Image (cartoon, grey):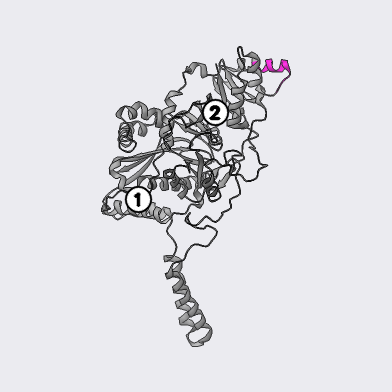
Amino acid sequence: MAAAGSSHSIVEYFGGESGYHCGYCKNETGNLSHGMWAHSMTVQDYQDLIDRGWRRSGKYVYKPIMNQTCCPQYTIRCQALHFQTSKSHKKVLKKMLKFISQGDVVKVASEEEPMDSHIEDAVACDFAYKSESRVSQSELTPLNVDHTERVENEDKDTGEIKEEVNAQQVESGSLQICADKGAPAPGEPSQSAKIVHAPPKPGKGADLSKPPCRKAKDIRKERKLQKLQNQMCTLEGSQHQAGDQVLLLQNSKSKSNQPKTMEDFIFASLPDDARHKLEVRLVPVSFEDPQFKSSFNQSATLFAKYQMAIHKDTPSDCGENEFTRFLCDSPLEAENAPNGPECGYGSFHQQYWLDGKIIAVGVIDILPYCVSSVYLYYDPDYSFLSLGVYSALREIAFTRQLHEKAPDLCFYYMGFYIHSCPKMRYKGQYRPSDLLCPETYVWTPIEQCLPLLEHSKYCRFNQDMKAVDEGRIKELGRVKVLHKRTMMPYSVYKKRRKGPSDEASVQQYASLVGQSCSERMLLFRS
């Protein structure tokens, strides 16, 4: 794995794409987005991009045009450290535990909405192929330091933005990233909104502002405890005996009454004679990794089986090439950091092995502040295990696990929440969750967003009308460009460029990725 900060992101911006078929409302041309091809990307840049509403499908990175697209897609994240399992989540965990232990689960289709219908990715997969880059690798390899120094001197002669290229150092074809003053400090993923829980409307779920419901058993125990304490005050002779009973009750309350955590179910001890064995393996997405390479054929076959059964794809839609481009080709550069997780950052396949064969694969990106869910495919023969929900819960538990070694990593990103498509609202059931404001890019608790979305499919969640996008582009000249294998600020490239001005396109790109990313990533110009 590369050391953190050893390379730059290199992107090719395509602008606002023409309308595509929408997988939600079936509109043939209503799906509108901006897109770019990521030849390579650092995990920090991708973290910052998804915190501005971008998302990747293979190497294609896209951002819905929120106020124009037919079905607005809001980035959703779950606060993994505070996540509480619902009754339906516990049912799924118990069902899996019972199946592994006893193997006698009733095989009926689950009523839960599976966390696997990532239609946004299947749709994105289509336009990723249409927009694929045609640039050769040689054009993307920056030249040595002499070329950069010439650009540096050229900029000095004009007396404009003298420090721009000065900070750049290129050694043997690799690029050195400079510390970005605008980047968030560790533990500060983007701009976080204050989390306040608003009471939901009737029928919209639990009121988080009120204490949780209590079991009748607990109330009975409490009354008995109170009665015994009263007896202690009035009956001197039986104080000792009553005190012992109080202690026993308190102990039984603390032991038996603690609600089971998600981890209690996931990592429960199994009997020696367990009917099945489930193993979850984290495999880096790299053909250089022996585990990834040895399981590739089995994984690709499972993908095809899933796509044909669940999404009704034809065999030609889900062959090995499509599988590779969609779920194995990742622009993310693998990185290891001293305060990062032991597995490092980058793209991974989380493989679910049941009795020696893969029954599901969760494709995830591990980033500085989150685990980002990319896609899930599974064996339709095991639909009765609610693998969509189960894998989402495993990924939340995995996020918590990573947080122990990497304190900044504490969120689970579930892709997009589409309120205008009822089938896609299930992502809002993983609480507490936040949605990203499409105008100011601050996080807002989902309870505050839902009433707004009931009135309008496109909403600005930030209710401070004076608030603006803090990461907006302020200096276009500082945008980094890769031109003729040489890094330079846009201010220099603009003078060298022949032909019609491309300033409008560069301005649009910079406004969408934000000032920080635009100064770190290299925008390819031919």
**Image position of 24 (left or right of 168):** left
Q: Position of residue 96 (x, y in %)?
A: 33, 51
Q: Quadrant of the C terminus?
A: top right
Q: CA distance from mark 2 to mark 1?
A: 47 Å
Which residue is depicted at the point 39% across and 31% down? Answer: 289
Region rendered in magenta:
151-162
Label 1: few (<14), some (14–19) or many (≥20) C-alpha neighbours in 10 Å? few
**Image position of 394 (left or right of 164):** left
Q: Position of residue 373 (x, y in %)?
A: 45, 40
Which of these two is toward me, 171 or 330? Answer: 330
In the rendered image, is residue 89 in sight?
Answer: yes
Reply above or below: 508 against 406.
above
Residue 6's mark? 2
How would you classify the magenta stretch by its main secondary structure? helix
Q: Amino acid at mark 2?
A: Ser
| Location of residue 67 by image quarter | top right
Q: What residue is pinned by disc 1?
A: 111
Of badges 2 and 1, the one in the foreground is 1
* Residue 288 is one of the magenta-drawn residues: no
Q: Position of residue 376 (x, y in %)?
A: 38, 39
Residue 182's mark? none
Q: Amino acid at mark 1?
A: Glu
Label 2: few (<14), some (14–19) or many (≥20) C-alpha neighbours in 10 Å? few
Please tell me whether mark 1 sits on a helix, a strand or a loop: loop
